Amino acid sequence: MADITMYELPGCPYCAKVRTKLDDLELEYDIIEVPRSHGERTEVEKVSGQTGVPVITDEANGVEGMPESDDIVEYLEETYA
């Protein structure tokens, strides 16, 4: 199991942006696909306090439930580039 976990919805352009950055940095990560219905996204809500995606966790650096694709990409660049 990788340190980084990404919560995503297939077809989400913001999620694709984060996946591209993860792949560009050659990072290992796990994917958890969230349901289409926001009301059913209990797992991502538990880690981030909201139901939007993408969200990442990074156990190696104590990141629990970081939302917003731009913030995630910036974090990944600063931490792993």
Image: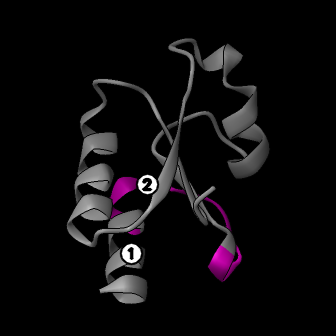
Residue at 79% in and 42% down = 46
Residue at 20% in and 66% down = 24
Nearest the viewer among 53 and 79 is 79
Q: Which residues are magenta?
A: 60-71
Name which quarter of the figure residue 21 lies in.
Answer: bottom left
- Residue position marked by numbered label 2 in the rendering: 68
Asked which secondary structure carries label 2, the reply is loop
- 36 shown above or below 56: above
Amino acid of disc 1: Leu
Q: Position of residue 37 (x, y in %)?
A: 57, 12
| Sequence-wise first label, 1 or 2 | 2
Q: Residues within 10 Å of mark 2 (few under 14, many from 20)?
A: some
Asked which secondary structure carries label 1, the reply is helix
Q: Position of residue 36 (x, y in %)?
A: 50, 14
Residue at 33% in and 67% down = 73
- Residue position marked by numbered label 1 in the rendering: 76
Amino acid of disc 2: Glu
Labelled disc at residue 47: none
Nearest the viewer among 26 and 36 is 26
Query: Which image quarter is the C terminus in?
Result: bottom left
Name which quarter of the figure residue 77 lies in.
Answer: bottom left
- 3 shown above or below 41: below
